[in-house]
C-alpha cells in the first residue's frame, strides 16, 4: 500500500510538472525554423552580396561565377 507521504510527494511532482508545462505554453517560441533565423544575417556584410548573387542566378546570369583564365575577377563580379 502507498503511504500518504509518497502520495503527497508524487502529487507535488505532478503539480510541478504541470506548472512547468503551463509556463512553456504561456511563452511560445517561433513555430518554425524560418522564423527562428529571420533577421539573423541583417548586419552581415556578405549577406547583401549573397542576395545579389542569388538574384543574378535566378535571372539566368551566371557569368559572375566564371573566373577568367587570367585569374582576374569579371567586371560584374560582386
Image: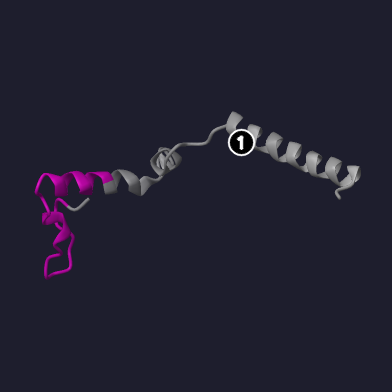
Q: Is residue 16 left or right of residue 36?
A: right
- Answer few, some or many: residues within 10 Å of disc 1's Cα (few below 14, many 20 plus, some between 14 and 19): few
Is residue 48 a member of the stretch shown in magenta? no
At x 70% / y 34%, what residue is drawn? 19
Looking at this view, name the residue that lies furthest to the bottom. Answer: 69
Q: Position of residue 36 (x, y in %)?
A: 45, 41
Specify whether residue 61 is painted magenta.
yes
34 left or right of 63 in image? right
Q: Position of residue 16 (x, y in %)?
A: 75, 39
Viewer-side residue, 34 vs 58: 34
Residue plotted at (90% across, 42% down): 4
Residue 76 higher or lower than 72, as above or below = above
What residue appears at the point 85 percent right and 48 percent down from the top-left corner? Answer: 2
Q: Position of residue 69 (x, y in %)?
A: 11, 70
Location of mark 1 (residue): 24
The outermost residue toward the front is 1
For the residue pair 60 and 1, the one nearer the viewer reads as 1
Residue nearer the viewer, 14 or 51:
14
| Residue range (magenta) | 51-76
Residue at the image point whose x is 58% and y is 32% from the top: 25
The quadrant in which residue 64 appears is bottom left
Residue 69 appears left or right of 29: left
Task: Using the rendered view, name the quadrant where residue 26 is placed.
Answer: top right
Amino acid at each position: 500500500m502507498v503511504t500518504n507521504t509518497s502520495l503527497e510527494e508524487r502529487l507535488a511532482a505532478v503539480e510541478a510538472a504541470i506548472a512547468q508545462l503551463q509556463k512553456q505554453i504561456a511563452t511560445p517560441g517561433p513555430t518554425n525554423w524560418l522564423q527562428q533565423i529571420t533577421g539573423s544575417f541583417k548586419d552581415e556584410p556578405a549577406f547583401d552580396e549573397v542576395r545579389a548573387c542569388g538574384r543574378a542566378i535566378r535571372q539566368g546570369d551566371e557569368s559572375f561565377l566564371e573566373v577568367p583564365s587570367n585569374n582576374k575577377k569579371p567586371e560584374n563580379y560582386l
